[in-house]
Image: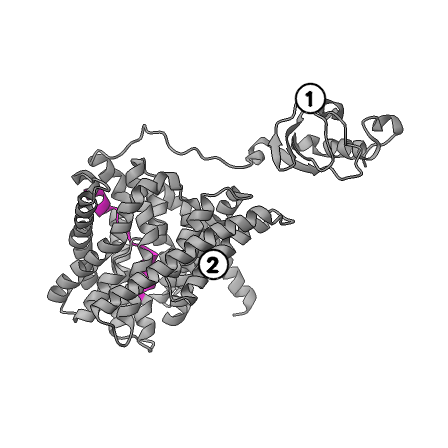
């Protein structure tokens, strides 16, 4: 097929995926299931697309996860998750370790896997998925502390699980002590890089006046990848770096911060669509039946034993340290809300790629089992979360939710926001606001002067280098522009001189 056909097919898949988001939103299902289904449709058993390249899938998957984590950091409200961070850190480190062991031991005994494969499966399944958690939980009326724990955990636990999977997938694994030191080193380096790039990026964006506002969101996303790539080059955790750098930038005063968040959200959705469709195409439906039984068994171990045990141990530790106190209802919900999504499937491509063959042997079987676990248990857990929260008495429908504040919702008002800078030779200098005599449907709402902003009065005089922010209806925009141009050229008596600002 030619490139135009591939482009048409790709655009059609994206449009279908966007429409599927609406269906998923109304049904309560994480949209990843529909995206995975689209991948199966275009794959070898559907439209016949042959894609079995775990190395490429791994690289593309890690980049997509970095984008998703960047969006998660940019859109996370630090004030909401601040109290939850200590608990989330314990869940993302000690909790992950407990989960790995709690999956590996029963899998070894029940399914007869060797210890290396059992630990690898436990590591792959240890991470909750940021995209799945954000898409489902941000629509649930949960107590802020509980929602904050889940959000922060999903953003932080990717880093240690990726390191663990990499170590277990290597040809020779280090000793337990060496592995723990390596994990600690990579997490520290990743944290330092993220906490360095984030503030430096904010500082630079505040002081560099870019000529086009649309460049700011691109710069923010580029800085997130500077953190990711910089940490990787220093042998640190790129995922932790990108999340922390994005968290800092998303909660700092930056130019066009809302636009940066919106842009990152759109790019993250595109990354999710591409990632899930690719993973669906990578799966071989003919091989899935053989993985159903071991996948369901491992999934039951994860949901009923490993996840609850990791929650109980983490809750005990944070209570012992006097950091937090989780009651049994909160622990039960945290156990059930540990959603898995694209992250485990992407991680399952790492040992498959390391196997060095198209089949991958045991690694391919692990991939298929993880695929089954993610599909089945996401289908079971995702839609039932509202019911479980209500059953446990944790649903708070009457609690004030975050207001959705958009920087310029002018499209709904059929209005425009004009930004006018007064040049040195302009005769707008000295003109009072009321002397502009703008149409009644237009208003000078703000003036930026010497780095300060204020709301002008009718008697406020305009000065050289002022920036005027004018809100006007779309119908009045042209007359407003002509009037301001006319005064700029001939002064407030421009009409007497026949100047119309054309």
Tell me what residue is drawn at x 70 percent, y 21 percent: 459
Dot 1 crowding, Cα within 10 Å, few <14, some 14–19, many 20+: few
| Label 2 element class | helix
Which residue was labeled with disc 2?
225
Q: Is residue 103 above or below residue 493?
A: below
- Which image quadrant for residue 168? bottom left
Residue extending farthest left: 109
Q: Position of residue 203 (x, y in %)?
A: 53, 49
Q: Residue tagged by mark 1?
A: 458
Q: Is residue 270 magenta?
A: no
Q: Residue at x 36, y 46 (%)?
A: 134
Q: Which residues are magenta?
A: 332-348
3 sits to left or right of 399: right
Residue drawn at 44 percent across, 50 percent down: 246
In-front residue for pair 53/482 = 482
**Majority secondary structure of the magenta segment?**
helix
Q: Quadrant of residue 281?
A: bottom left
């Amino acid at each position: 097929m030619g490139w135009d056909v591939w482009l048409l097919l790709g655009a059609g898949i994206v449009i279908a995926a966007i429409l599927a988001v609406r269906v998923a939103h109304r049904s309560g299902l994480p949209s990843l299931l529909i995206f995975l289904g689209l991948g199966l449709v275009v794959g070898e058993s559907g439209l016949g697309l042959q894609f079995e390249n775990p190395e490429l899938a791994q690289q593309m998957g890690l980049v997509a996860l970095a984008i998703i984590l960047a969006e998660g950091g940019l859109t996370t409200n630090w004030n909401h998750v601040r109290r939850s961070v200590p608990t989330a850190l314990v869940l993302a480190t000690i909790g992950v370790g407990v989960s790995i062991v709690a999956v590996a031991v029963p899998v070894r005994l029940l399914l007869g896997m060797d210890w290396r494969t059992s630990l690898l499966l436990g590591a792959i399944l240890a991470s909750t998925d940021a995209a799945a958690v954000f898409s489902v939980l941000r629509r649930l009326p949960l107590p802020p502390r509980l929602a904050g724990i889940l959000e922060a955990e999903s953003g932080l636990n990717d880093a240690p699980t990726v390191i663990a999977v990499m170590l277990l997938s290597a040809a020779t694994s280090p000793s337990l002590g060496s592995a723990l030191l390596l994990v600690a080193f990579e997490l520290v380096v990743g944290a330092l890089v993220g906490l360095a790039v984030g503030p430096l990026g904010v500082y630079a964006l505040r002081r560099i006046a870019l000529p086009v506002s649309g460049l700011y969101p691109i710069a923010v996303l580029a800085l997130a990848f500077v953190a990711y790539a910089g940490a990787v080059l220093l042998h640190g955790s790129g995922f932790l770096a990108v999340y922390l750098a994005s968290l800092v930038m998303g909660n700092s005063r930056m130019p066009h911060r809302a636009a940066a968040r919106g842009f990152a959200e759109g790019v993250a959705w595109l990354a999710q669509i591409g990632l899930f469709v690719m993973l669906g195409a990578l799966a071989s439906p003919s091989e899935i039946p053989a993985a159903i039984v071991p996948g369901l068994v491992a999934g039951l171990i994860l949901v009923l034993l490993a996840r609850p045990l990791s929650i109980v141990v983490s809750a005990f530790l944070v209570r012992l340290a006097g950091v937090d106190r989780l009651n049994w209802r909160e622990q039960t919900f945290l156990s059930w809300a540990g959603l898995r999504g694209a992250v485990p499937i992407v991680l399952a491509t790492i040992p498959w790629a390391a196997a060095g063959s198209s089949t991958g042997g045991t690694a391919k079987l692990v991939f298929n089992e993880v695929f089954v676990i993610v599909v089945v248990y996401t289908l079971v857990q995702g839609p039932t979360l509202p019911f479980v929260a209500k059953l446990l008495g944790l649903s708070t429908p009457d609690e004030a939710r975050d207001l959705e504040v958009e920087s310029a919702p002018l499209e709904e008002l059929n209005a425009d926001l004009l930004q006018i800078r007064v040049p040195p030779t302009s005769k707008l200098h000295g003109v009072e606001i009321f002397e502009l005599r703008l149409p009644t449907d237009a208003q000078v709402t703000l003036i930026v002067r010497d780095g300060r902003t204020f709301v002008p009065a009718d008697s406020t005089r305009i000065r050289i280098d002022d920036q005027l922010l004018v809100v006007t209806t779309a119908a009045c925009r042209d007359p407003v522009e002509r009037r301001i141009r006319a005064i700029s050229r001939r002064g407030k008596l421009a009409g007497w001189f026949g100047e119309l600002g054309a």
